[in-house]
Image (cartoon, coloured by chain):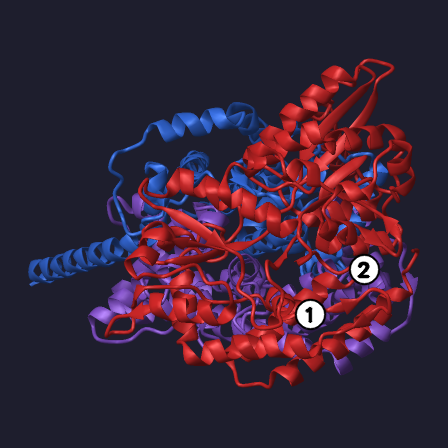
Chain colours: A purple, B blue, C red
Amino acid sequence: MVNTRVSAEKRHSRIARRNLINGLLFASPWIFGFIVFTAYPLIASMYYSCSAYSGLAAPKFIGLENYVQIFTQDDMFFKSLKNTMYMVVVALPLGLIASLALAMLLNQRVKGITVYRTIYYLPSLVPAVASAILWMWLFNPEIGLFNVILKSVGVTGPAWLGDPAWAKPALVLMGLWGTGGGVIIYLAGLQDVPQSFYEAAELDGASAVSKFFNITLPMISPIIFFNLVMGIIGSFQYFTQAYIMTHGGPQDSTNFYALHLFNSAFVDWNMGYASAMAWILFVITLVCTLVVMKTSAKWVYYGGGD
Amino acid sequence: MATAERSRRAGYARSRTIWAYVVLTLLSVVFVAPFYWMVVTSLKTDRQIFEVTTWYPDPVMWSNYARALKFIPFARYTWNTLVICVMTMIGTVWSCSMVAYSFARIPWKGRDALFLVVLATLMLPGQVTMIPVFMIFKWLGWIGSYKPLIVPSFFGGAFFIFLLRQFFRSVPNELSESARIDGATELGIYARVILPLSKPALATVALFTFIGGWTDFMGPLLYLNDPNKYTLSLGLQQFVSQHGAEWSMLMAASTVMALPIVILYFAAQRTFVEGITLTGIKG
Amino acid sequence: MPTYTSEHLGVRLRVFFELSVVVISACAACILLSGCRTVLPASGKTEIVYWTGWSGHEFDVLQKLVDEYNNTHPDVHVRMLSVFGSYQKVRIAFAGGDTPDVCSAVWAEELAGYAMRGALTPLDGYLAKSGRSLDEWEPGIRDMVRYHDRTFGLLATVSGDFIVYNKKAFKERNLQPPTNLEEWARVNDTLTVRAKDGSYKTYGMRPNGLVLWAYIFGGHWFEPETGKITATHPKNVEALRFLQDFAKKNDIRRMEAFESTFGSMETTNGPFFVGKQLLLPTGPWIRQFLNRYAPKDLEVGAFPYPAPEGGRKMCSNISGSTWVIPAACKNKDEAWEFLEWMMRPEQNVRFCSQIGNGSGLTEVANMPVMTADPLMKLSAEISGGPNAFGPPQMPVWPAYQAAIARAEDQAVHGNHDPEVLLKQVEVKMERELKRVQREAVY
């Protein structure tokens, strides 16, 4: 009796050790790359955050002075954080729902669906500088397409990118239309839902809604989880469109956290301060992600278990 | 009775299909518009470019394309960009799938903690690591070559590791277990069970990596100091002068640049076959 | 006792082997691919790397000059590279210790920031050795390129800004180019006509840019002698009030909307070209745009920014790319020779006239080829005059500019008191200026 239990434990520890070695082996490219390419910049930026560093001369250690200044003297810190939270709370859910809806639509077994899928991906292929021009025209309060359409139904459209109250919604609208990337990921995920499940459900008389909520959603929940976490991380770092198009205006309504950070680093010559801002953002993002991951056990279903 | 039911079902399916087409077509007008506008602008004369509301060019300046392709060393830039994109595609797909396999299919101590570290590397804005990363490449002597753009892709990227991990975890345990019982090694399961079942995911990773390399501007700008090595995204900037740009040629070049991606996208779509057939599930 | 079977060992080894093979072959591929290095110049030649911020047309003009220099100077090879206007690349190169030998991608606004931190080579010794002097340059430039009594850069081109107008529109309405602010206000009101639905039938212009207007009113932003930030100068406040009043009297949002057809790109000239906008604040580069994009029958005149009573006439901001030699340059003598050659009148006139910018050298600015075009002539008069103001010689000017722009934004779109806003700017910049002093080398 004792022998079999002991040898069962030995077998488990042998398996565990083999798994550890295999696991590390397969992960070794990342581990190696982390040590060579990532660890030093992480440590360096942490050091910069506690330094007076212009990006030119060597950094000079000043302790937590940057952090103190951020919290006590920088009014733009809270404003930019609020602007960014807007994107996290508004743009992210909208984007997730929109790309999933679009993916469902593009998952139909109709002829020519491949052409449609390509069309929906085309917006991502227009280079940033060109799409910026186009969107600024679309949003133009006088002659832009949106307000012209609104005028034709008797509504005076807002000033969009020129109005502090409408600039962020305009950017959200613009972001929605570039959901091509998320759609592809969902489409790939939808391929993993076996037709047989749907057929079996149909035989039981399930409705389309029921099939969606009881089959589709759980089966692609790992992908939803991915898009959610990456969406959180990405929204917190929202930067490019504000940098190209609005430069933070009007009246700082699109001055997002990452833009304020960029300006601190490259306009104000205050790389140390920017690094402190970066690490604060890191902590915020990490906390949000951990919260999502903790709750994920309840709604994410992995076919591969655990 | 049964036939009536079947034909009712068929009719229902048909009307759903028509509805699907209607919605798809309407929405696709919205989505295709910017690309269409870009193509139209590339065919306009200089004077017409500022008339944003003209949705068709008249006359049609096909010569803009010839001019654009001669204005910059298009062939060389395309080749350079292809080299970078293909290498990073290979490196990313290979390394990220291996690492993702480790996080998804092998239970080992400390795995989830390390995975959190992987994720955490995405959470620090890149602007504050640009300088130390540059310094590393300078210390390695890689500034001025393609190495900073290609080599890191062989060591996994957190985004794709995360993505592939989610896909790999969705593969039912029974499949790998049965392979293991049949005597397969970890590498064998990885190569013969997981990878073939993840073709759409791998195609997506390849596609995204290619597009990332194809459109990357900051990387080539920072690390390349020889115009002979330039990529297409840097080439596009050569249409931009201090007080304006060669808009028609810029749009023409952008259109040409977009074509390989469209082709690649079509190719990737071929792996997106509805409902994979999972063979080998033991009842 | 169960041991690892040779099969397990074999598998692990095989995995490791396969991994190494791929990694090694990948690295080998990279090394091979990147092995096509630039052909090094023949032995004996010193290589000078020159980074320019220009791309496109201006880059081609520069390349011709660089080629000529290489042909006439056999023991030096100048290699030019464009950074496409990215000051990020320049900043990171400086930080990473990978600087070029000559760089003209340092904007005048940033010069003091680089200079103060010891990143640039002072040029006074070189100027004297080559028999050159800053007196050859326009007065406004002399102040711009010096920091704490040292010269840190030189400018090749500079432009004075002015306002162009549609001659036909003026003739139709019997208007004369305004000579002061009052006249300008009347002209602008006459030209700005709205339809019943609020859209613009014709449009004058919207004054903006507090930095400039403060100078026009007679104020200033910084006192180099005392190192004092003078954001709350009474004339600055007056200028901001002027901008605020204009915004209140006119529908400022509509005006901005009208002007934002192409957003931040310089190509907002569409409405002017088609005759809808009748006044346009711009610079001499507009000539190239007119030649290319405007209808042939568009007749254009220009007048300098109108000043109020007691303000500065013929006033403008001037700026440009500064040509510098980084402190880490290893071939300073050769770098200076190239820089000095580019700054000779014979080269400079070719460069400036071909890119349609004004010249920073007084001798060149007055050459017939540069003054043949009335727009260029006016630009040269303004930029060479006493009221051409470059960025003040202070290391936090970019942040200062941003703060001023924010104050203007708030005054024009809100109801804040100009004096209060400018006081906030002053306090903030005083703090910033103090903060960077601890990094001072010069």
Q: Position of residue C413 (x, y in %)?
A: 50, 78
Residue that label 1 marks = A286
Q: Is residue C351 visible?
A: yes
Left or right of A152 in this view: C14: right
User: Which residue lies at the image location 36% right of the left edge and 74% below the top edge?
Assistant: A158
Q: Are the numbered discs 2 and 1 placed on the same chain, yes or no?
A: yes
Q: Residues within 10 Å of mark 1 (few under 14, many from 20)?
A: many
The residue nearer to you, when weighing A243 against C328, is C328
* Residue B114 rendering spot, x and y as whole percentages: 74, 59
SS state under label 1? helix
The answer to whether A140 appears left or right of C113 in the picture is left
Contact? badges 2 and 1 (CB < 8 Å): no
> Residues under labels 2 and 1: Cα distance?
17 Å
C88 shown above or below A297: above
Amino acid under disc 1: Leu
Q: Is residue B220 at least partly visible in the picture?
A: no
Checking the image for residue A45, the label placed there is 2
Which chain contains the residue that carries disc 1? A
Q: Mark 2: which amino acid? A: Ser
User: The residue tagged with tag 2: helix, strand or loop?
Assistant: helix
